[in-house]
Image (cartoon, rainbow, N blue to C red):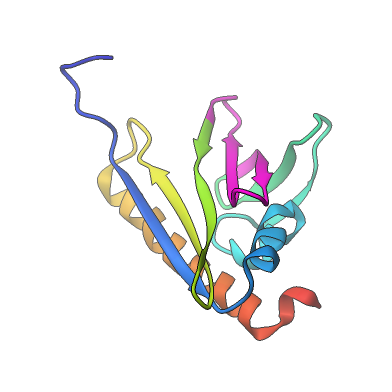
Amino acid sequence: MNDSEPPARSVTKHVTIDRPVPEVHAFLADAANWPRWAVSSVLAVEPAGEPGWWKMSTPDGPAEFRIYADAATGILDHDFRDETGEVARVPARVVANERGADFLITITQPAGLPDDAFEGLLGSLDAELATLKNVLESGTARA
């Protein structure tokens, strides 16, 4: 650990969804559903040649991701890999609340990404979480 540099900035966002935890988890664990809710960052997905990885089209070009899902614990971590081959782990969880589910996701600001760009990313994530809530609560997730 380098004591001369502070830890990277990270922000945890969440959304409360009025649906059962198993339904929310199953929807998010299926990579094919991501273009339906992550509308700012995931334009399209298809299985990649490497097991577990999905190709995705993003506004910044092609990338890949894989999901580590465990319904028993609510884990929905995912790895994001861009064209450089660098992998970033994104922790995420679905947890029960008394009448539904909370989806939590932590984003860490990559080294070299300006603060204003990171703020833009967080704003897009807020919009995506609102879309996720709408898709699941409106019943269109089952369509």
User: What secondary structure characterizes most of the magenta part?
Assistant: strand
- 79 is higher (above) or lower (below) than 60: above
Between 86 and 28, the one lying in front of the other is 28
User: In front: 52, or 97?
Assistant: 97
**Magenta includes 1?**
no
Quadrant of the rendering where the N terminus is positioned: top left
* Residue at the image position 80 percent from the left and 29 percent from the top: 50
Q: Position of residue 143 (x, y in %)?
A: 81, 78
Q: Is residue 52 left or right of residue 134?
A: right
Residue located 59% across and 41% down the image = 78
Q: Quadrant of residue 61?
A: top right
Residue positioned 66% across, 42% down in the render: 67
Q: Position of residue 47 (x, y in %)?
A: 82, 43
Q: Please, which residue is most extreme toward the left here? A: 4
Residue 45: % across, % down: 74, 51
Q: Is residue 140 above or below residue 12?
A: below
Q: Is residue 110 above or below residue 60?
A: above
Outermost residue toward the front in this view: 98
- For image coordinates 74% across by 42% down, the residue present is 54
Q: Give yes or no for residue 86 being in the magenta stretch.
A: yes
In the image, taking residue 44 as reference, residue 38 lies left or right, namely left
| Nearest to the observer: residue 125 or residue 1 | 1
| Residue range (magenta) | 61-87
